């Protein structure tokens, strides 16, 4: 059965990387190709300074930028490309993980000098959890980086994924001459140029084409031939099915800042990357080409104007067609809602959306109806899966500093954690509120926003916990047993699931030994 052309033409993905590998630069080059922006430098760098954790201006700036660049859509070669932006700062990694639940594939940028970094590994783990297809772009080939073969080995061992190079560098750093496009049999010669999109592309039949020797000297050409022979032997041809199943990553080499190797990447991407297909709900599988509309909220953004409490909920459309002013069913709240001002956030502005298709993301003005993970349908009771919470590493207890503003504090904490700024855990007895976050910056954000948006004041009392695991057991009695015997380590997450808090890995392992019937999970996605 052929699918609707509007679905088929959509490619919704995220560009991810360890900070500074070149994500923003690559995004910008893609937008240039798509004509969505005209000049380099138009994409705001979406990151707070990595070293300042208390610069509130940076926090505000980051929030402003991240709403403006939440989704960058453009048309390229008859395809509709949606790039979902992810924050650069590691303290906002959870935001990135959630955004990854709303894409159909990713491009992972790796710095050729630094190779696989900490955040590269973590992001890849998240992709692997849901078998997201990954294309890898090795950036900064204009610098004296690691050897290309070594980089491929490093990817395979550290990221536990098979790789298959689709372009290959000729030289590197000072001697970087260009890339050979294995996928399209083209030679692409390097000419550093940051401002315009022009590259001499030489189409060749294969490696024996005499044209090649007109452009490359004997030595680099021989090396290229030798390399490619080796590649053919080791990696073979690209197995697209394996790529689509998330088992194999095609790899490209280039230099984003010099606009080099980008077209190969983009052209192959639109050729092989998946269009919206299907998505798992708790009740059943939902296919993109079903007639009825479905979608879910993966990100909530507070209004930047503190006087207005409304927020923007970002909805990923999974099936059917979304229409403005039509009533949809909010399955968690069991009520109907319609949206008169759904927004499309493009690179430089926002526009009103009349209709949107699977793969698209629309911004919905929300006065408090949505939580991350909420599902909208045309009436069916569905709940999409796959928006996990990850176990935080820093835990602090909330202490109210202004008893006159207790209500505001409660509301603020509730809303900010619903927005996904950090996770809220409640401990009994006494309803102790514990905030768990991935990074220190989140506590600053919460403090700042509580005061500015809710007029509440709080202090955070550091706790000794640094690990947490959601706990389950098939035998409910066993679950009760650990809850009672380890009461001071038990808290409950936003959905009332029990979570075991521990000081370190050793304490977790001890608990695992003492309670062999309990399963410990590092993400909330264990159903
Ligand atoms: P992000 O943190 O991953 O978004 O990285 P950016 O796109 O902001 O790039 C980080 C730094 O690397 C910036 O100073 C870029 O100018 C630089 N950069 C990006 N691409 C290249 C490249 O191909 N070669 C070199 N030498 N530098 C690059």
Image (spheres, helix red, strand yellow):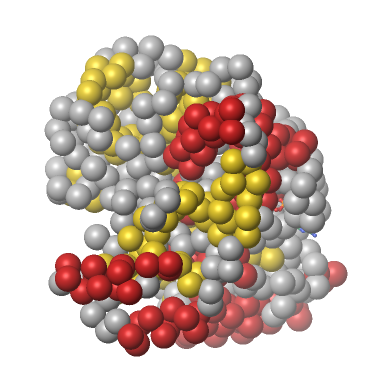
Look at the image and tell me in which quarter the C terminus lies.
bottom left
Which quarter of the rendered image does ligand 1 occupy? Answer: bottom right
At 75% from the left edge and 39% from the top edge, which residue is drawn?
56
- The answer to whether any part of residue 268 appears in the image is no
Q: What percent of the width, then of the height, locates residue 79?
A: 43, 37
- Residue closest to the eye, 260 or 92: 92
- Residue closest to the eye, 209 or 58: 58
Q: Is residue 378 above or below residue 372?
A: above
Look at the image and tell me in which quarter the N terminus lies.
top left
Task: Using residue 92 as the reference point, say whether residue 174 is left or right of it.
Answer: right
Q: What percent of the width, then of the height, locates residue 429?
A: 39, 55
At 58% from the left edge and 68% from the top edge, which residue is drawn?
464
- Residue closest to the eye, 64 or 492: 492
- The answer to whether any part of residue 493 appears in the image is yes
Q: What percent of the width, then of the height, locates residue 314?
A: 44, 33
At 28% from the left edge and 19% from the top edge, which residue is drawn?
337
Q: Is residue 380 above or below residue 112?
A: above
Q: What percent of the width, then of the height, locates residue 295?
A: 30, 35
Q: Quadrant of residue 176?
A: bottom right
The total number of labels drawn is: 0
Furthest toward the right, the residue is 174
At 25% from the left edge and 73% from the top edge, which residue is drawn?
481
């Amino acid at each position: 059965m052929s699918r609707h052309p509007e679905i088929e033409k959509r490619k919704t993905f995220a560009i991810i990387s360890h900070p500074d590998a070149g994500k923003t630069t690559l995004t910008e080059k893609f937008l240039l190709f798509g004509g969505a922006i005209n000049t380099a430098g138009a994409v705001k760098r979406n990151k707070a300074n990595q070293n300042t954790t208390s610069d509130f201006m940076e926090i505000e700036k980051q929030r402003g930028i991240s709403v403006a660049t939440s989704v960058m859509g453009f048309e390229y070669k008859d395809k509709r490309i949606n790039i979902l932006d992810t924050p650069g700062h590691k303290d906002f990694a959870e935001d990135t993980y959630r955004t990854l639940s709303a894409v159909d594939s990713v491009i992972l940028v790796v710095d050729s000098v630094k190779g696989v970094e900490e955040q590269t590994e973590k992001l890849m783990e998240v992709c692997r959890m849901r078998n997201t297809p990954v294309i890898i772009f090795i950036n900064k080939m204009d610098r004296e980086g690691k050897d290309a073969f070594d980089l491929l080995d490093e990817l395979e061992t550290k990221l536990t994924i098979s790789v298959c190079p689709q372009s290959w560098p000729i030289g590197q750093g000072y001697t970087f001459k260009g890339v050979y496009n294995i996928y399209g049999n083209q030679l692409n010669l390097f000419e550093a140029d940051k401002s315009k999109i022009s590259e001499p592309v030489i189409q060749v039949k294969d490696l024996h084409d005499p044209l090649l020797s007109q452009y490359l000297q004997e030595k680099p050409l021989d090396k290229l031939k030798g390399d490619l022979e080796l590649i053919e032997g080791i990696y073979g041809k690209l197995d697209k099915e394996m790529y689509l199943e998330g088992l194999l990553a095609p790899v490209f080499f280039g230099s984003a800042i010099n606009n080099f190797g980008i077209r190969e990447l983009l052209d192959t991407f639109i050729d092989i990357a998946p269009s919206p297909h299907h998505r798992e709900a708790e009740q059943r599988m939902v296919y993109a080409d079903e007639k009825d509309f479905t979608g879910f909220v993966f990100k909530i953004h507070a209004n930047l104007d503190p006087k207005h409490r409304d927020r923007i909920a970002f909805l990923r459309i999974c099936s059917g067609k979304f229409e403005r002013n039509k009533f949809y069913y909010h399955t968690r709240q069991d009520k109907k809602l319609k949206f008169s001002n759904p927004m499309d956030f493009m690179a430089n502005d926002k526009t009103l959306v009349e209709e949107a298709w699977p793969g698209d993301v629309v911004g919905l003005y929300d006065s408090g109806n949505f939580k991350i993970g909420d599902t909208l349908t045309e009436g069916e009771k569905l709940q999409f899966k796959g928006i996990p919470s990850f176990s935080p590493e820093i835990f602090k207890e909330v202490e109210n500093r202004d008893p006159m503003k207790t209500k505001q504090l409660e509301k603020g904490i509730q809303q900010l954690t619903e927005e996904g700024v950090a996770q809220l855990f409640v401990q009994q007895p006494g309803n102790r509120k514990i905030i768990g976050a991935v990074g220190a910056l989140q506590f600053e954000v919460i403090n700042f926003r509580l005061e500015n948006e809710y007029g509440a004041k709080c202090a955070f009392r550091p706790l000794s916990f640094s690990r947490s695991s959601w706990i389950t057991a098939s035998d409910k009695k066993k679950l009760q047993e650990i809850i009672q015997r380890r009461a001071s380590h038990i808290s409950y997450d936003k959905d009332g699931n029990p979570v075991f808090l521990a000081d370190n890995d050793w304490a977790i392992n001890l608990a695992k030994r003492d309670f062999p019937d309990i399963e410990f999970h590092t993400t909330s996605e264990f159903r």
